[in-house]
Image (cartoon, rainbow, N blue to C red):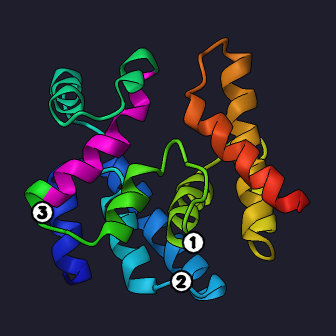
Amino acid sequence: MKRDQALAIVKEQITQHRYQHTLGVMETAIILAERYGADAKKAELAAIFHDYAKFRDKDEMKAIIEEQDMDPELLKYNSELWHAPVGAYLVEKEVGIKDSDIIDAIRYHTSGRPNMTLLEKIIYLADYIEPGRHFPGVEEVREMAKSNLDRALIKSIRNSIEFLMKKNQRIFPLTFHTYNDLVKKEAD
């Protein structure tokens, strides 16, 4: 699928503000893919579609999680997590993208997972550090991403966990497992 076609599909699903974010994620993902030797075309498509389901009705997302036998634990946590796995499903079903690398990068861009692929790491991190993001700690992660993808990923996940803890919000277990997996591999 060509970039213009993909962007046109996504633009109908999200707000103008989110579309600008998507363009930033796309450009950042391509840079990271080229820097770390991933498939830039897959990174581009995964980035374009990463927030495809972001503005879907919560009841619709809940129904898809239940009907498609997704992890039922998702429903016990903040609904902000839902758009990633639901988006992966809908991109495959509605858009027709079948590439499992792209679908998984979309699926895990909010939670991560142990043993993340290079493409999954790139989409997770591109979403975090795209140029439109402005919050404490993002500049440090942007700098780290220039030289060490895994260290930047660890720092971004730690920042996210700390942010949620400060807000007294629950943290999805897969995010902790991702953090632990990356820290263990970094130490080995």
Q: Is residue 20 visible?
A: no
First-in-chain label (2 vs 1)? 2
**Residue at 21 percent of width and 59 percent of height:** 10
On the rendered structure, is 90 left or right of 37?
A: left
* Mark 1 surroundings within 10 Å by alpha-carbon count, few (fewer than 14), some (14 through 19), many (20 or more): some
Q: CA distance from mark 1 to mark 3?
A: 23 Å
Looking at the picture, how far across and down is residue 64, in whole percent?
Answer: 17, 33
Residue bearing the label numbered 3: 95
> What amino acid is labelled 2 in the image?
Ala
> What amino acid is labelled 1 in the image?
Leu
Dominant secondary structure (helix, strand or loop) of the stretch shown in magenta: helix
* Mark 3 surroundings within 10 Å by alpha-carbon count, few (fewer than 14), some (14 through 19), many (20 or more): some
Q: Are marks 2 and 1 in contact (CB under 8 Å)?
A: yes
Which residues are drawn in magenta? 78-92
Residue 91 covered by magenta stretch: yes
Residue bearing the label numbered 2: 38
Q: Quadrant of residue 182?
A: bottom right
First-in-chain label (1 vs 3)? 3
**Residue at 59 percent of width and 88 percent of height:** 37
Q: Is the residue 156 above or below the residue 43 in the image?
A: above
* Mark 2 surroundings within 10 Å by alpha-carbon count, few (fewer than 14), some (14 through 19), many (20 or more): some
**Residue at 38 percent of width and 56 percent of height:** 106
